[in-house]
Image (spheres, helix red, strand yellow):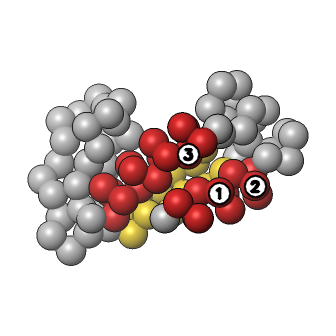
């Protein structure tokens, strides 16, 4: 989750098992909170990082989120649920 550009590109592959599991309400709430922070120019405190956090961007960031957990056709429903939270 290291920020290395002035935008965020985020691919979500499943919360429990890659490419199979969907996202429950708690997981989607957590992702919505992270997305809001990134969009405001910050970095979420719970982000898994290798690098130190970057300085906040006053102008904010564009955030692109893709669900790639579609083995059980969950991706469209998870995307709609996340959108409703934002």
| Gap in angstroms between the C-alphas marked 1 and 3 | 8 Å
Residue 83 in the image: x percent, y percent? Answer: 58, 64
Residue at the limit of the structure toward the bottom, as seen here: 59
Q: CA distance from mark 3 to mark 2?
A: 11 Å
Asked whether disc 2 touches disc 1, contact meaning CB atoms under 8 Å apart, the reply is yes
Left or right of residue 19: residue 82: left
Q: Is residue 54 left or right of residue 14?
A: left
- Describe the element under mark 2 as helix, strand or loop: helix
Mark 1, residues whose alpha carbon is within 10 Å: few (<14), some, or many (≥20)? some
Residue 28 percent across, percent down from the top left: 55, 45
Residue occupying the point 30% across, 55% down: 37
**CA–CA distance between discs 2 and 1?**
6 Å
Vertical order, 4 against 46 (above or below):
below
Name the disc covering residue 81, or none: 1
Q: With respect to residue 28, does 42 lie above or below?
A: below
Q: Are marks 1 and 3 in contact (CB under 8 Å)?
A: yes
Which residue: 18% across, 36% down?
Answer: 52
Relative to 65, residue 12 above or below: above
Q: Which residue is mark 3?
A: 28
Q: Position of residue 33 (x, y in %)?
A: 39, 50
| Labels 3 and 2 touching (C-beta < 8 A) | no
Tell me if residue 38 can be seen. yes
Q: Is residue 34 left or right of residue 58?
A: right
Kindly identify which residue carries mark 2: 77
**Dot placed on the residue nearer the N-terminal end, 3 or 2:** 3
User: Where is residue 57, by image quadrant?
Assistant: bottom left
- Choose top left, top right, bottom left or bottom right for residue 65: bottom right
User: Which of the two discs, 1 and 3, labels the residue nearer the N terminus?
Assistant: 3
Secondary structure under tag 3 reads helix
Q: Quadrant of the N terminus?
A: top left
């Amino acid at each position: 989750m290291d920020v290395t550009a002035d935008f965020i590109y985020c691919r979500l592959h499943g919360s429990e098992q890659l490419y199979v599991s969907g996202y429950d309400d708690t997981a989607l709430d957590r992702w919505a909170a992270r997305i809001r922070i990134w969009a405001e120019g910050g970095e979420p405190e719970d982000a898994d990082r290798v690098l130190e956090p970057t300085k906040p961007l006053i102008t904010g960031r564009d955030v692109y989120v893709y669900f790639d957990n579609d083995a059980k056709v969950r991706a469209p429903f998870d995307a709609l649920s996340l959108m409703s939270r934002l």
